[in-house]
Image: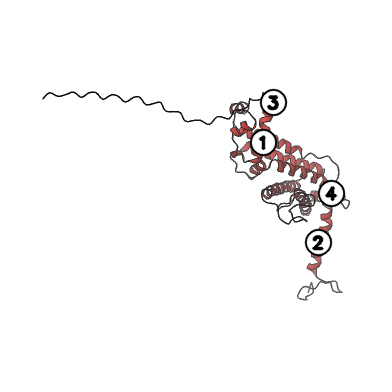
Amino acid sequence: MDARIADPVPAAPPADPPVPAARAPRARRGPYRRLPVEQRREQLIAVALELFSRRAPEEVSLDDVAAAAEASRPLVYRYFPGGKQQLYEAALRTAADELASRFVEPVRGTPTERLGHVLDRYFAFVGEHAAGYGALLRGGSVAENERTTAIVDEVRRAAYGSIIDQLGVERPGPRLTLLVRSWISVVEVAALTWLDDSRREPAQGAGADGTGRAAGGEVRHGAGTAAELRDWLVDEFVVMFAAAALHDPQTERVLRTMFASFAGSGPGAQLVARLGGMLGALLGDATGPMDEAGEADDADGVRGGA
């Protein structure tokens, strides 16, 4: 029986080419503004500083900076070949120079009044650059390195130099140096606490009207308003100065000069009066009533010196 050859099966027609998925239309980027070189660099730093003030450095990308500056990522790299780290350090340097400039205070008024004015400008800066200030001083940021630490140390040295100048001291000794640097650390911790509190709800009922606002309308947080912190820090300065004066002749001489300028008013003057009254009351309570012989009776009725 002859084998029959089957008819060839016709090939399937070629499949239609796949239809590409519809793409969302790209947002058109406006044309880049051409700026002079130095002006463009200053603009990128200002934009970066604003972003770093609202977010931690590791949460800001170069794309964020480029978008905010209406520029391209390659353009940002052209000005800052080192990438975000170089841009962060440049922004930090700009902020540090601005903060250091706020320590300059004319020699007018008492030392504590001038100190209060400097603190006003200091807290204004902290409020303007909250996140970046907090992330840097707390440490632990991936953007932190020896260069950024050196920049912050320069600000601290500027603050120290300004205070020493305002006190009129030419050659501060080790005790006085330690005192001023310790107080600067207290200011930094107070500013960080103030920032933490400012991110929470205002303290309810803290103000006279129960709204959490001070008399002047400034929002009061847990640590108080910036003005209240300023007054407290000035008082803290005077108290630390008085404690150091008990152990250091140079600090005592400076403190006497400071007290001579109070004239019964100004920051620190009320503290001295109130502290004197409080210490007098405490000493009176500690010694108890005096008998006719001038000896104090203790709580058990035993005469002193018996």
The earlier-in-sequence mark between 2 and 4 is 4
Residue of label 1 = 49
Q: Nearer the viewer, mark 2 or mark 4?
A: 2
Instruction: Reply above or below: 216 against 289.
Output: above
Q: Are marks 3 and 2 in contact (CB under 8 Å)?
A: no
Residue of label 4 = 258
Residue 289 found in image quarter? bottom right
Residue of label 2 = 278
Mark 3 lies on a secondary structure that is helix
Q: Amino acid at mark 4?
A: Met
| Residue nearest the viewer, comparing 226 with 26 | 26
Instruction: Reply above or below: 195 against 101.
Output: below
| Residue nearest the viewer, comparing 212 with 82 | 212
Q: CA distance from mark 3 to mark 4?
A: 46 Å
Residue of label 3 = 38
Q: CA distance from mark 1 to mark 4?
A: 39 Å
Q: Residues within 10 Å of mark 4 (few under 14, many from 20)?
A: some
